[in-house]
Amino acid sequence: MNDSQPPALALRGLTKRFDAKVAVAGIDLVVPAGSFFGLLGPNGAGKTTTLSMVVGLLRPDAGTAWVLGHDVWSDPAEAKRRLGALPDGVRLFDRLSGPELLAYTGLLRGMDPATIDQRATELLDVLALRDAGRTLVIDYSAGMKKKIGLACALLHAPRLLVLDEPFEAVDPVSAALIRDILSRYVAGGGTVIFSSHVMEVVERLCSHVAILDQGTIKAVGTLDEVRGSRSLEEVFVEVVGGRTATGEELSWL
Amino acid sequence: MAVVTLGTFVRLKLRLLGNGLRGRPARVWLFVAGGLFALYLAGVGFLLFAVSGVGDPQVRLLVASYGGAALVLGSTLLPLVWFGIDDTLDPARFALLPLGRWRLVLGLFAAALLSVPSAALLLATTGLLVPVGRHGGAGAVAAQLVGLLAGLLLCVAAGRAVTSAFATMLRSRRVRDLAGVLLAALAALLGPAQLAIISATQNADLDQLTTAARVVGWTPLGAPYTIGIEVAEGRPVAALAKLAITGAAIAGLLWWWTRSLESAMVGAATAGPARADRPARGGPVSQLFPRLVPGLPATGFGAIVAREVRYWWRDAKRRANVISITVVGVLVPVIVTAGGGRITLDFDGEGFVASASPTMINVTVLFVGAFAAAMLANQFGFDGSSYAAHLIAGVPGGRELRARAIGHAILIVPVLVLVSVVAAAMLADPAVAPAAAGVVFAGYGAGVAVNTFVSVLAAYPLPETANPFATATGSGLAKSLLALVAMVAASIIAAPVLAIAAALGDAWPWLAVPIGAAYGAGAAALGCYLAGDVLDRRAPELLAAVTPSR
């Protein structure tokens, strides 16, 4: 890899607090270009808050985020051009049908209509959304919504994909499909950072991992550096400090 | 196991209200402002009812009967157009609980009674106790107090039953068009009714009005508010009968509510049938653009316009707004004013009123134009968190606001043209059509300018419930106060057009459309340009403001 090339994503001192609660407490993170990066953390660790600040949805209290060398908050146009995002817990424009939503996203991105038509049709075919026809996205199943959201993020062929919980509520067949598409995207030179708490998926896909807990990075590095000789799940539970049941509780169950 | 009582629902509502305000100073202020506004309205109402005590018995009957009827009608129809209803307790949330239908309705009813508007309503109507007490003594006051409480129950039950029924109709793809037609028909009836009332008040003497008031007093509209008068005049049986009429009406409304409530509860789970019936034509881009609106450019700007046009119809919340505001807020005032203008003309003699009437029409259509733009005051709230897609794509603020304004104008301008034609037809004067059109365009453009600013600076989330009339907890009054201020501001901005119209006199109808359209378009463009700058600076804050908390 060329050393002069800027990282796909660089965060420095990123901080966000809500009222008294510190959601993200000064994160420094470098996502190398061409990596498949898994952001792990328990519920409430600050994964969604961090990724929202990266894609420009949530203004950080302090710190900076660079996408391929462009500051998301001072040079948003250049950063957003290189970025595709699938936020979690955010509605799509769901009173459009799948093809309409893709066309809409493409036009917002300033793409040429012929390119949109060609790519959108291809994406709908690959993601098995063609049969939905004119069904509005609001009537899609949860897995279909994830897939059309991913298609929207991919449409303008970004160099960095930021995905928040892309495998949540997705059935195994669709999950395998999404994994294939993302692997091919990374093989083609793209960079993916996604959040998850499914160890198995992260272990299978990722080249790099970071474990986030209570708003700070507890462990970061390549997959092998982080897990060593143990399983990722063991490392995760140890780092996060989970508890194990003694067998005494819940005796009424 | 604890029994679910009415108190459970009331406590639940208070707790939700309290939690919604806790730690959010802006909402507390909004709530307080809404409360003060309500207190002011209640005070005015109280005085109006109370001063009828100095009049003779006929005046007292007129005020109690017509005033009460106006309150009941107002609390039935206003939620459809202006206030919406407080949906703190969303029926869909109770769908999985083992609660009987009637227990649920009574619980929701009890919780609905506990609100700022109902407190204001009760306070205003206590003014009726003053004349009753002065002329009837303690017994009559006690009877009237029961009547007031029954009247409050009636008002709240009517508002809930009607919004719930219309929500059900607007949600269903099969009958939603019927709901619009029904509303339009209701509104159209107001025109002839208004004519009848005006000619009655102007031609009839006090005796005829009193007879009509007596009749209204025996309908559910006036019955609860005339109970005290019956007791004061020594007819306790009549008072009891009126109480029974009110009680029957309340029971009937609650029964009606239970019918639509069940559909509201399952509505959340089954969003509706898929639309896979017709095959799509063309590629994705051509599917996005509605064929009814040709000529939109295939750019980001054109795409937002196209989506806005589709959304005003596809989104139940927006559709409910479009239908009810168009019918009740736009067509009705024109019908009423035009109808009233003609009668005044016949009654007062031609010379004076014939020259005053066009001015009155102009002022009315100016307000109508400003009111039509009030739909935009929370345009980002309608979209909720889906606005995030625009942030991720980095849509410039000015382009965003211009596209939204044009999308709305594509739907509304034809209605405004219709308004001008209707006004001309009612006055039987073809020159009124272009004259009114010029003013209404100016009013609409000014309204777009003001409400675009409001939508960027004072956006609020709409609850994601199945009821398109639902507003967020406890803030409905303050929001409607803000909308009122915006409307007045828009009217002031557009007022110079009225001066131009007056200055041009007979030449105005010829120049009205170009002048009014240019004025309105200029105001709207300036508003979008300035507000676009603000939007560019605080787009993430706007997204946070319209995202419903879960």
Image: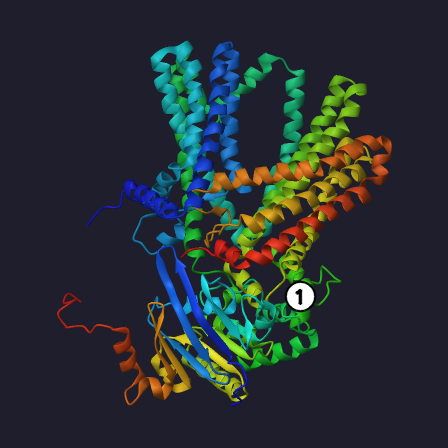
Identify which residue is drawn at 48% across, 20% down: B47
Chain under numbered label 1: B
Q: Is residue B101 left or right of residue B66?
A: left
- In the structure shown, which secondary structural element does the residue marked by tag 1 occupy? helix
| Residue B387 screen position, x and y as percent | 55, 60
Which residue is more in the foreground, B318 or A67? A67
Colouring scheme, one of rainbow, by chain, secondary structure, one colour: rainbow
Can I make out residue B185 in this image? no
Q: Is residue B226 above or below residue A154?
A: above
Q: Amino acid at mark 1?
A: Gly
Identify which residue is drawn at 51% across, 56% down: B541
| Residue B14 screen position, x and y as percent | 34, 42
| Residue B146 screen position, x and y as percent | 36, 24
Q: Is residue B416 left or right of residue B117?
A: right
Furthest residue in direction front, as rendered:
A4
Quadrant position of residue A76? bottom right
| Residue A237 screen position, x and y as percent | 27, 77
Instruction: Report how many numbered discs are placed on residues in the image.
Output: 1
The image quadrant where one finds the C terminus of chain B is bottom left
Identify which residue is drawn at 44% across, 83% down: A176
Identify which residue is drawn at 86% across, 31% down: B506
Q: Is residue B432 above or below residue B232?
A: below
Mark 1 burial class by Cα count in 10 Å: few <14, some 14-19, many 20+: many
Q: Which residue is mark 1?
A: B300
Q: Is residue B335 above or below residue B385?
A: above
Can I make out residue A78 in this image? yes
Q: Is residue A49 left or right of residue A235?
A: right
